[in-house]
Image: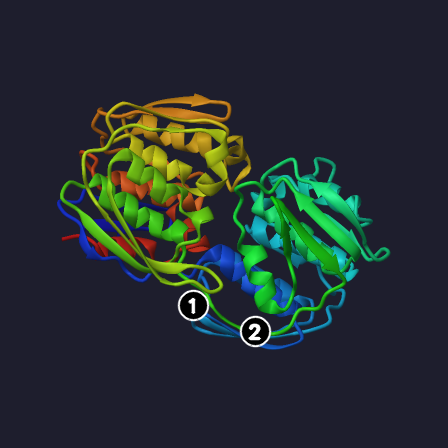
Amino acid sequence: MTNTQTQLATTVAPARALGGLAPNIPGDKSISHRAVIFAGMAEGVSHVTNVAPGEDVASSMRCVEQLGASVQRDGLAVRIRGGAWQAPAEPLDCGNSGTTMRFLIGALAGRRVEATLIGDASLSRRPMLRVAEPLHALGALIETAAGGTAPVHVRAGHPLHGGHIHMNVASAQLASALMLAATGANGRVTISGAGSARDHTAKMLPFFGVAVEREGDDLVVVGPQHFRAADFRVPGDPSAAAFWLAAAAIVPGARLRVENVNLNPTRLGFVDALERMGAGVQLTVTSEDPEPMGHIEVSARPLRAIAIEEPEVPAILDELPLLGIVAAYATGTTTVRGARELRVKESDRIAVLVNGLRKLGGAVTEVDDGFDVTGGTPLRGATVESGGDHRLAMAFAIAALRAGAPVTIEDSGCVAISHPSFFSDLEALRR
């Protein structure tokens, strides 16, 4: 056994070789949230399969159930009977899921349903004014805590009206909240500023009967509109696949293939980065509707440093800490800029990455909106802190695969948020 786990920490040993077909990756978390919430808003019964197994999506299920939907889960399949929402008797607990909270703020405002949204300590530090303020411009009545964070109280108020909202942050969560609110507005809502943010909501809403128009770079929803039930299979999560792809890129001689993964271009920033760094990358598209899906194969080759600038960040934001790990094994200095959003995720991901890499012996510099990693210095074994952040815990586990000695990751149980079987799946890749 090369990997030992306790309740509080996991030790991962270096890998002599990796290869073959990666374990089935979890359903795409971003798409699972949307499918669950949209089905909960729809008239009739929806069947959603290959739902992401982690705690974040479970939070979305519990919340729509509190709002009046019927949710029956059988493994990775969920049957949801949606319809009219009602004010919940208790606050909606979004757990650690910023997606759940931000989506529901918009959906509740559009449906004129009064509710209070709460979350765990981490979520309660994350900014919610970026959602509340643009919704105010459409007539929503939303109150936050003094610092612009949860608890968030959405009041029933009056029907929302149309308007033109320019987003100051290219955030898929914000764009989605605005689109969901717009489905309950009286009139035309134009949303600009989404830029290269993920476009899953605009692709999926028509699948649930809601028309979304594109006018240049703007998104337009003319309300009111009604959701209809649909059957939907969630593709594999490229953010989860990224860890296996990174492992294949850094372990000499490795070659790994992940199948049935979401290939939406807005989600392939990490794959593009690996290819720019010199890794062998091959994509195969097997289906297109409503999201492109297929296979990704990565093989190890000598890696070189790259620069990530602000326009690229939305397509790679969640994977940037993992890119920092890969950069430690590349020739030259990899720079990341325009990624200050990492500081208000489940942890301050810039600080946690930098602290962990330094403990492993990496050459890394922290800047306000990113980091620099200079490769070429072999990483060593050490104990690192995950910051209670699932993505950092998994990133440090990948770093361990080519370190000089085992790496112990503290608070590793947080991987259950998105990928409960991560450590056992990692073991299955060793050769």
Measured as percent of width and height from the top left, residue 70 is found at: 62, 75
Tag in front: 1 or 2? 2
Residue 376 horizontal side relative to residue 411, left or right? left
Asked if marks 1 and 2 touch (Cβ < 8 Å), the reply is no
Residue bearing the label numbered 2: 230
Residue bearing the label numbered 1: 50
Q: Quadrant of residue 213?
A: bottom right
Image height of 306 relative to 123, above or below? above
Residue 371 horizontal side relative to residue 3, left or right? right
**Dot label at residue 257:** none
Q: Quadrant of residue 204?
A: bottom right
In primary-sequence order, the first of circles 1 and 2 is 1
- The one nearer the camera, 36 or 145, is 36
- Say what secondary structure mark 1 lies in: loop
Residue at x 17% of width, y 45% of height: 15
Measured as percent of width and height from the top left, residue 126 is found at: 60, 40
Three-letter code, disc 2: Ala
Residue at x 37% of width, y 42% of height: 270
Pointer 2 local density, CA inside 10 Å: few below 14, some 14–19, many at least 20: some
Residue 191 horizontal side relative to residue 255, left or right? right
Q: Quadrant of residue 331?
A: top left
